[in-house]
Protein backbone atom coordinates (compact mmCIF):
# COMPACT_ATOMS: atom_id res chain seq x y z
CA UNK A 1 0.00 0.00 0.00
CA UNK A 2 1.09 3.55 -0.63
CA UNK A 3 0.80 4.41 3.06
CA UNK A 4 3.86 2.27 3.81
CA UNK A 5 5.95 4.49 1.53
CA UNK A 6 5.40 7.55 3.73
CA UNK A 7 8.37 8.58 5.83
CA UNK A 8 8.73 11.01 8.71
CA UNK A 9 8.81 14.69 7.79
CA UNK A 10 7.71 14.06 4.21
CA UNK A 11 7.06 17.41 2.56
CA UNK A 12 10.13 19.29 3.73
CA UNK A 13 12.52 21.05 1.40
CA UNK A 14 11.97 20.70 -2.34
CA UNK A 15 8.98 18.39 -1.92
CA UNK A 16 6.99 20.98 0.04
CA UNK A 17 4.10 21.05 -2.43
CA UNK A 18 4.35 17.36 -3.30
CA UNK A 19 2.62 16.41 -0.05
CA UNK A 20 -0.34 18.63 -0.85
CA UNK A 21 -0.55 17.30 -4.41
CA UNK A 22 -0.50 13.74 -3.07
CA UNK A 23 -3.17 14.62 -0.52
CA UNK A 24 -5.37 16.08 -3.27
CA UNK A 25 -4.88 12.89 -5.27
CA UNK A 26 -6.07 10.88 -2.27
CA UNK A 27 -9.03 13.23 -1.99
CA UNK A 28 -10.02 12.45 -5.57
CA UNK A 29 -9.79 8.74 -4.79
CA UNK A 30 -12.12 8.96 -1.77
CA UNK A 31 -14.95 10.54 -3.76
CA UNK A 32 -17.99 8.94 -5.36
CA UNK A 33 -16.25 8.86 -8.74
CA UNK A 34 -14.16 5.95 -7.46
CA UNK A 35 -16.30 2.81 -7.82
CA UNK A 36 -14.13 0.46 -5.74
CA UNK A 37 -14.78 0.85 -2.01
CA UNK A 38 -11.40 -0.68 -1.15
CA UNK A 39 -9.65 2.06 -3.12
CA UNK A 40 -11.69 4.71 -1.28
CA UNK A 41 -10.75 3.13 2.04
CA UNK A 42 -7.06 2.83 1.20
CA UNK A 43 -6.92 6.38 -0.14
CA UNK A 44 -8.30 7.71 3.16
CA UNK A 45 -5.86 5.54 5.15
CA UNK A 46 -2.92 6.64 2.98
CA UNK A 47 -3.97 10.28 3.46
CA UNK A 48 -4.11 9.61 7.20
CA UNK A 49 -0.57 8.25 7.15
CA UNK A 50 0.59 11.23 5.08
CA UNK A 51 -0.91 13.72 7.55
CA UNK A 52 0.63 11.85 10.48
CA UNK A 53 4.11 11.92 8.95
CA UNK A 54 4.24 15.11 6.91
CA UNK A 55 6.08 18.23 7.92
CA UNK A 56 4.29 20.54 10.33
CA UNK A 57 4.64 23.36 7.77
CA UNK A 58 2.41 21.41 5.40
CA UNK A 59 -0.12 20.54 8.13
CA UNK A 60 -0.46 24.20 9.10
CA UNK A 61 -1.45 25.26 5.60
CA UNK A 62 -5.10 26.18 5.20
CA UNK A 63 -5.49 24.30 1.92
CA UNK A 64 -4.10 21.14 3.56
CA UNK A 65 -6.69 21.27 6.34
CA UNK A 66 -9.50 21.97 3.88
CA UNK A 67 -8.39 19.04 1.71
CA UNK A 68 -8.32 16.74 4.76
CA UNK A 69 -11.85 17.81 5.70
CA UNK A 70 -13.00 17.30 2.12
CA UNK A 71 -11.44 13.85 1.91
CA UNK A 72 -12.90 12.82 5.23
CA UNK A 73 -16.36 14.15 4.40
CA UNK A 74 -16.38 12.24 1.13
CA UNK A 75 -15.42 9.03 2.91
CA UNK A 76 -18.12 9.56 5.54
CA UNK A 77 -20.80 9.86 2.85
CA UNK A 78 -20.35 6.17 2.02
CA UNK A 79 -23.43 4.59 3.59
CA UNK A 80 -22.81 1.07 2.35
CA UNK A 81 -19.23 0.35 3.48
CA UNK A 82 -18.40 1.11 7.10
CA UNK A 83 -14.65 0.60 6.58
CA UNK A 84 -14.60 3.64 4.30
CA UNK A 85 -16.36 5.73 6.96
CA UNK A 86 -13.95 4.49 9.65
CA UNK A 87 -10.99 5.40 7.42
CA UNK A 88 -12.42 8.92 7.00
CA UNK A 89 -12.55 9.33 10.76
CA UNK A 90 -9.01 7.96 11.10
CA UNK A 91 -7.89 10.70 8.73
CA UNK A 92 -9.43 13.36 10.97
CA UNK A 93 -7.92 11.68 14.01
CA UNK A 94 -4.46 11.84 12.40
CA UNK A 95 -4.91 15.56 11.81
CA UNK A 96 -6.10 16.24 15.35
CA UNK A 97 -3.41 13.99 16.85
CA UNK A 98 -0.73 16.28 15.43
CA UNK A 99 -1.58 18.58 18.34
CA UNK A 100 0.10 17.25 21.48
CA UNK A 101 -1.49 17.31 24.93
CA UNK A 102 -1.50 20.51 26.97
CA UNK A 103 1.56 19.87 29.10
CA UNK A 104 3.95 20.23 26.18
CA UNK A 105 4.87 23.84 25.37
CA UNK A 106 6.21 23.51 21.86
CA UNK A 107 5.79 26.56 19.60
CA UNK A 108 5.29 24.29 16.58
CA UNK A 109 2.52 22.48 18.45
CA UNK A 110 0.81 25.80 19.17
CA UNK A 111 0.97 26.83 15.52
CA UNK A 112 -0.63 23.56 14.38
CA UNK A 113 -3.44 23.98 16.91
CA UNK A 114 -4.03 27.57 15.82
CA UNK A 115 -4.26 26.43 12.19
CA UNK A 116 -6.80 23.68 12.97
CA UNK A 117 -8.82 25.61 15.57
CA UNK A 118 -11.04 27.50 13.08
CA UNK A 119 -12.28 24.09 11.89
CA UNK A 120 -12.87 22.66 15.35
CA UNK A 121 -16.66 22.98 15.24
CA UNK A 122 -16.84 21.25 11.87
CA UNK A 123 -14.62 18.38 13.07
CA UNK A 124 -16.58 17.99 16.31
CA UNK A 125 -19.82 18.05 14.33
CA UNK A 126 -18.57 15.26 12.07
CA UNK A 127 -17.53 13.23 15.12
CA UNK A 128 -20.89 13.73 16.85
CA UNK A 129 -22.79 12.76 13.73
CA UNK A 130 -20.67 9.61 13.42
CA UNK A 131 -21.39 8.61 17.02
CA UNK A 132 -24.84 7.48 15.90
CA UNK A 133 -23.47 5.16 13.19
CA UNK A 134 -24.70 1.56 13.24
CA UNK A 135 -21.19 0.11 13.04
CA UNK A 136 -19.36 -0.07 16.36
CA UNK A 137 -15.91 0.56 14.87
CA UNK A 138 -17.09 3.80 13.30
CA UNK A 139 -18.54 4.98 16.61
CA UNK A 140 -15.30 3.96 18.36
CA UNK A 141 -13.27 6.08 15.93
CA UNK A 142 -15.68 8.97 16.45
CA UNK A 143 -15.27 8.60 20.22
CA UNK A 144 -11.48 8.72 19.90
CA UNK A 145 -11.79 11.87 17.83
CA UNK A 146 -14.08 13.49 20.38
CA UNK A 147 -11.77 12.58 23.26
CA UNK A 148 -8.74 13.90 21.39
CA UNK A 149 -10.39 17.30 21.04
CA UNK A 150 -12.20 17.64 24.38
CA UNK A 151 -9.40 19.70 25.99
CA UNK A 152 -9.07 22.15 23.10
CA UNK A 153 -10.13 25.75 23.76
Image (cartoon, rainbow, N blue to C red):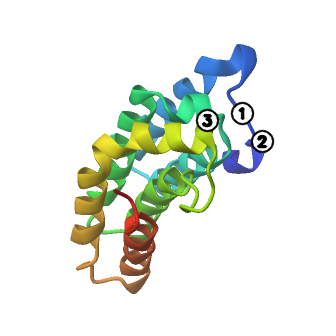
Say the numbered circle drawn on residue 91. Answer: none
- Determine whether the residue tagged by mark 2 lies in a helix, strand or loop: loop
- Determine whether the residue tagged by mark 1 lies in a helix, strand or loop: loop
In the rendered structure, the answer to whether residue 78 lies left or right of residue 40 reads left
Query: Which residue is denoted by mark 2 in the rendering?
Result: 7
| Distance Cα–Cα, label 1 vs label 2 | 6 Å
Image depth: mark 2 or mark 3 in front: 3
At 61% from the left edge and 35% from the top edge, which residue is drawn?
A: 56
At 44% from the left edge and 53% from the top edge, which residue is drawn?
A: 36
In the rendered structure, the answer to whether residue 109 lies left or right of residue 40 reads right
At 64% from the left edge and 20% from the top edge, which residue is drawn?
A: 16
- Seen in the picture, residue 143 relative to 57 is either above or below; the reply is below
- Seen in the picture, residue 124 relative to 68 is either above or below; the reply is below
In the rendered structure, the answer to whether residue 132 lies left or right of residue 151 reads left
Query: Is the C-beta separation of discs 2 and 3 under 8 Å?
Result: no
Q: Residues within 10 Å of mark 1 (few under 14, many from 20)?
A: some
Q: Position of residue 73 (x, y in %)?
A: 30, 50
In the rendered structure, the answer to whether residue 26 lies left or right of residue 104 reads left
Q: Residues within 10 Å of mark 3 (few under 14, many from 20)?
A: some
Front position in the image: 77 or 38: 77
- Seen in the picture, residue 33 relative to 153 is either above or below; the reply is above
- Determine whether the residue tagged by mark 3 lies in a helix, strand or loop: helix
Would residue 73 be visible to someone looking at this image?
Answer: yes
| Distance Cα–Cα, label 2 vs label 3 | 13 Å
Q: Position of residue 53 (x, y in %)?
A: 68, 44
Say the numbered circle drawn on residue 56. Answer: 3
Query: Is the C-beta separation of discs 1 and 2 under 8 Å?
Result: yes
Query: Which residue is denoted by mark 1 in the rendering?
Result: 10
Front position in the image: 126 or 77: 126
Sequence-wise, the earlier of marks 2 and 3 is 2
Amino acid sequence: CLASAMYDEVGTGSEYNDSLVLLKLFSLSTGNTQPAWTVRQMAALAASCLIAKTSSHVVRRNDTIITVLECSSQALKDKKFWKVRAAGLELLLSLVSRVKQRGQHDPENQLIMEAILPYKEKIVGIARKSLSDNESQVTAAASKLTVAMNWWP
